[in-house]
Amino acid sequence: MSSDNNVPQKDNVHGDISQENISRALNQMDWTDIKSHDSWELFKIMSEFVQGFEKMARIGPCVSIFGSARTETSTPYYVLAEEISYQLAREGFGIITGGGLGIMEAANKGARRAQGRSAGLNIYLPFEQAPNPYIDRDKLITFDYFFVRKVVFIKYSQGFIVLPGGFGTLDELFEALTLIQTHKIGKFPIVLVGRNYWQGLIDWLKNVVLGQQKNIDPEDLNLFAVSDDPKEVVRIYKEFYSKYMLKPNF
């Protein structure tokens, strides 16, 4: 059986992946080009930090709610996110989300329903990330850089509520856990909502990461709570902040 290496290959996701396109995508810049490009990139990064810090500093104490952009409006998790957000906003917390659809939309919708502050830290993506209509107009920020967006989330969030989601949600969850574990920020509340969804991850952390490999300490499993009850989630936050001050994390 023979093959023709000159025939461009196709796939359903990326289209033409011919050698010419690969070469173009991997085009090498010389060191001078790289240095010049990186220097100008720094100004763009700085401008995103400045914009994020200036806007979020005016909003006040907020809780970030994370979860999948793919969650349908008819699902129990969408309803849970909206109700938790609604009850937190009634207690005076602003709500921050990633600004997109699904769980993020539900959380912003709950804040809007309670006439609370509803912020969205959106990001430019080729899919899934159009801003939802429940974000306050003056509290929508759109980023190019995930790492800048994540810093703004962490700096101004007084806690995380994490509903079912994918890689992005897991990234945000473990970023927060790592910063608390290493004492880079205070031990603010983290609540996982969706016990059935998270149980496999919790079992793996307990049995493999801790039990078999000893890669975390036993007390690290106490850095988060798990609840499917909106009233209990709100109680966790109210009890915590009856003892501690609300302030930016760094």
Image (cartoon, rainbow, N blue to C red):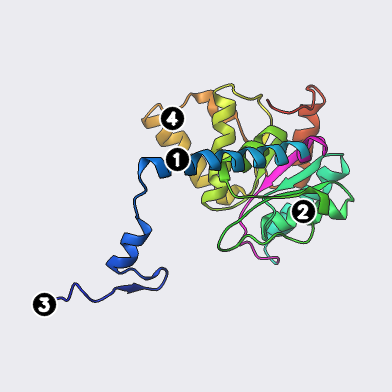
Q: Nearer the viewer, residue 111 or 196?
A: 111
- What residue is rendered at 78% in x and 35% in y? 57
Magenta segment: 55-73
Q: Which residue is mark 2?
A: 108
Instruction: Residue 192: give x, y in percent of width and height.
Output: 63, 43
Q: What amino acid type should be assigned to the residue bearing mark 2?
A: Asn
Asked if 12 appears above or below 196 in the picture, the reply is: below
Between marks 4 and 1, how big is the CA–CA gap? 8 Å
Task: Tell me the crowding category of disc 1: few under 14, some 14 to 19, or many 20 or more residues within 10 angstroms, Cα based.
Answer: few
Q: Which mark is residue 204?
A: 1
Q: Do the residues bearing badges 2 and 1 touch, measured as CB atoms within 8 Å?
A: no
Give the residue at the far left of this rendering.
1
Q: Which residue is mark 3?
A: 2
Q: Is residue 11 left or right of residue 90?
A: left
> Considering only order in the chain, which callout, 2 or 4, is on the residue closer to the N terminus?
2
Q: Say what secondary structure mark 2 lies in.
A: helix
Between marks 3 and 1, how big is the CA–CA gap? 47 Å
Q: What amino acid type should be assigned to the residue bearing mark 4?
A: Leu
Between marks 2 and 1, how big is the CA–CA gap? 32 Å
